[in-house]
Each structure stands twice: as structure tokens, then as C-alpha cells.
Image: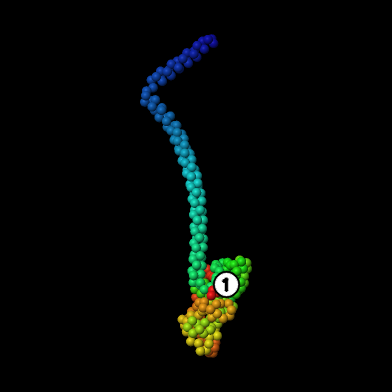
Amino acid sequence: MKTSKTNLIGTIITAAILIAVVVLSNIGTTQMSTAGNVVSKIFMPVQNGVVYLKNKITKNNQAISDMDALKEENAKLKEENSKLTEQVRELEIIKAENDSLNDYMNLKNKYTNYTTVPASIVEKSISNYDKVFIINVGKDDGIVENLPVIGSEGLVGHVISVTDKTAKVQTIIDTASTVSSSLTTSQETILLKGELGSETQIRGTYIPTDSTIIQGDTLVTSGLGGIYPRGIMIGTVTQLVNTKNLTDRYALIDTAINFNTISSVLVITGVNS
């Protein structure tokens, strides 16, 4: 009985295999193509996705590589820019030093009748009441108090205090400054003082009652007072102010020196014979 059932099952399986072989052998090319298309449609999106991801990764890697290259180039440009900036600064310093040397040479050539020490103004204190300069020479350079200080256009002031390396100069526009001057036209003596609130004018007082002073007259140091040698240019009369009392009249004088822009001076240490 068992043998019969086994034979029947084997017969059924054999028949199924034969039928499958026949069916497969009868499938045409068109049907095989259709099956391939089905498979292609199923797997194509997956393939496309893989290709997209591959390209994306490749592009990202390239972008990262480009960014690293840009960072490196930017760092190089910053370094070059820093070097160029430093070179420009050095050239500016050299130019400033050259300009100062030219100023000193021009000053010395102009004032050959004086023994002088060149100096640069390193600090300015300009207020209503205090108008002084600090210059970069001092005791170590032979500078002492009361030495006159001049610029390219004329009188600046005189030294009022000294350290080893620096000196303080009281300018003629300081309200505490007093300078004895004389008119170049008549040799009349006039006392000059700093004008309150002004950085460009000084006041001429004690004008002789019979003086012929007029607008446009020039004033130079008189040589009186023991500080300033005679003949240093001071300024030009711009206005004569009359008062009720003739003895109280005064003149306003524009200084020859521009105290806002001056940077180089000479300290007079002696007068050449």
C-alpha cells in the first residue's frame, strides 16, 4: 500500500517537471523581453539612486577639496597683504624721516648765523591758556632753559624746562609769553603777548604814542630781554585797534609760524660771529 502511494507521488512530480520544461521551452522571445522589462522597472530606480548617491558623494568630495584650496589661498593672500602693509608702513616712516631731514637741512641753511640743534615736536598742548610743545632733545643734547626755538618761517618760542631727553617749549602764542619786538620799518619797540583764545595771532601792546605802525608792517625780535637774538621774524600786523586812550591801543599780529602744522624746529644754542 505504501509502495503504491510512493509511486503515485513520484509520478505526479515527474509529470509536473515535464510540464514545466514544456512550458519554458515554449516561451517566446517577446515574453522573455517582457519579463526583463518588469525586472528592469523594478531595479532601475535602485540603480539610479545608487548612481545619484555616487555622484553626490563625488561632488561633495570635490567641493570639500575646493574649499580647502580656497582656505589655503586665502591664508596666503592674508600673509602677503600683511607683508605689503608692513612694507608700506616702513616706507611711510622712511619718507617721514626723509622729510624731517630735509626740513632740518633747509632750516640750517636758512639760519647759518646761529649754532643750532634740530628737533622734532613730539607733543603739542594747545588750549586757551596753555600753548606749549614737547621736543625730542634735552640735556643730553646740550639743551638748557631759556634757549630760543625757531621754525622755517620765524620765531616759535623758548625752552622753559628740560629733561635728559626732552624739552618743553613755551610758544609765543601762549598767554604767559612776552616777546620784545621791533618794526622793520621804523625800529620802534613793541611788546608782544599771546592772545587769549587764538592760535594764529598775538597782541602788540605798549605802542609808542607817536608810532607810525600800520597794517602790513612786519615785526622781528628786538634783541632785548636776554632770550631772543635780534632780527628773527615774528609776524605781520593785520589790525590796529584804537581805544579812548592812545596809550592803550594795540595791534593784532598774525604769526609767521603756523603752530597747528609745524613739526620740525631748531633750538638756538649760540650765535655765530
The residue under the point 51% across, 60% down is 93
**Rendered position, 142 above or below 244:** above
Question: In the rendered picture of this protein, how many numbered marks are placed on residues?
Answer: 1
**Residue receiving disc 1:** 269
Above or below — where is 190 with respect to 143?
below
Q: Nearer the viewer, residue 34 or 229?
A: 229
Residue 168, horizontal then vertical, whole percent = 59, 71
Front one among 255 and 80: 255
- x and y percentages locating residue 74 in the rendered image: 49, 49
What secondary structure is found at the residue carrying circle 1?
strand
Residue 192 seen in the figure: no
Which of the 4 image quadrants contains residue 128?
Answer: bottom right
- Image coordinates of residue 108 in percent, x first then y, are 51, 69
Q: Is residue 140 in view?
A: yes
Residue at screen point 51% across, 56% down: 86
Q: Residues within 10 Å of mark 1 (few under 14, many from 20)?
A: some
Task: Say what amino acid the circle numbered 1 marks.
Answer: Thr
Hey, which quadrant is residue 227 in on the image? bottom right
Is 48 rendered above or below residue 31?
A: below
Q: Where is 23 relative to 146, above or below?
A: above
Spot occupied by residue 241 in the image (x, y as percentages of width and height): 50, 85
User: Is the N terminus in the top left, top right, bottom left or bottom right quadrant?
Assistant: top right
Q: Residue furthest front?
A: 273
